[in-house]
Image (tube, rainbow, N blue to C red):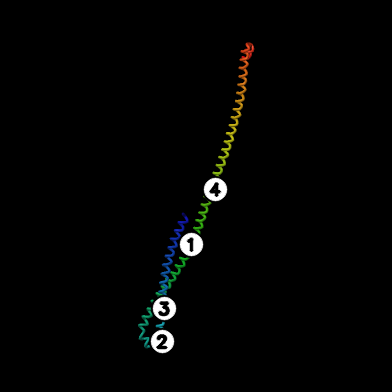
Amino acid sequence: QHRRELDAKQRLHDANILKIRAEAESRFSRQKTELVNKHKEEIGKLKVQQIVSTLPPGAQMMSAPEEQDRKVEVASSTKKTLEVHAQAEELQSLRQRLDKQTRANSNLLKHKEELAGKLFDAERNRSSSEASLRAAMEHQMIEQKQLSDEAHSTEIDRLRQNQDELRAEYEERLVVASREARDMVSAQLTAVTDGDEKRLLELL
């Protein structure tokens, strides 16, 4: 998102720079054309002045008013020529400032892009670190659950073994008690059958 915003701002800035440069170059071209035309006009007038200077004195006096008008026109033209020169220099200075600003903006954009790239890399590394941490935690939880399940299973096996041992011991005692009771009852029956009251009393 940040990179897209930078790109959009740079495109807008470049468009403005191109527009300003085009306008400046158009003005510079017009002023240059005017300057060239004025220069040609000055050369033509100088040639006329040279021709007039070669005329006889009478001819020069007859053309004096025209010469005066020509001098006024030359002075006015010279003033305009100087103004055109000044405007041309101003336009050239403007172009140089625009070029300098364009280079500065380009360097600034490059720096911003580098910062955006570093920010993107940092964000990607952070996401990668978080993913690695989550994976490590999940792996640890799985291992702990496995250990817990194994411990629980071991405890269940131990309890079952204890139950089996107690059941076996109980069954053994029950067998012994049953056998003893059976022997005692059998002896009592035998005593009754034999009429041995004394022995019966002993058994009781």
Name the residue located 45 percent from the left edge and 69 percent from the top edge: 92
Q: Tell me the CA gap for discs 4 and 3.
A: 79 Å
Indicate the amino acid at tag 4. Answer: Ser
Name the residue located 45 percent from the left edge and 62 percent from the top edge: 14
Q: Tell me the CA gap for discs 2 and 4.
A: 99 Å
Tell which tag, 2 or 4, sits nearer the viewer: 4
Q: Looking at the image, which residue sits at the far front? A: 193
According to the picture, the residue beneath numbered tag 2 turns out to be 54
Q: Is residue 149 above or below residue 92?
A: above
According to the picture, the residue beneath numbered tag 4 turns out to be 132
Tell which tag, 1 or 2, sits nearer the viewer: 1
According to the picture, the residue beneath numbered tag 3 turns out to be 40
Q: Nearer the viewer, residue 27 or 89?
A: 27
Tell which tag, 2 or 3, sits nearer the viewer: 3
Q: Nearer the viewer, residue 171 or 47?
A: 171
Of the residues under marks 4 and 3, which one precedes in the sequence?
Answer: 3
Of the residues under marks 2 and 3, which one precedes in the sequence?
Answer: 3
Q: Position of residue 59 (x, y in %)?
A: 37, 87
Q: Which mark is residue 38?
A: none
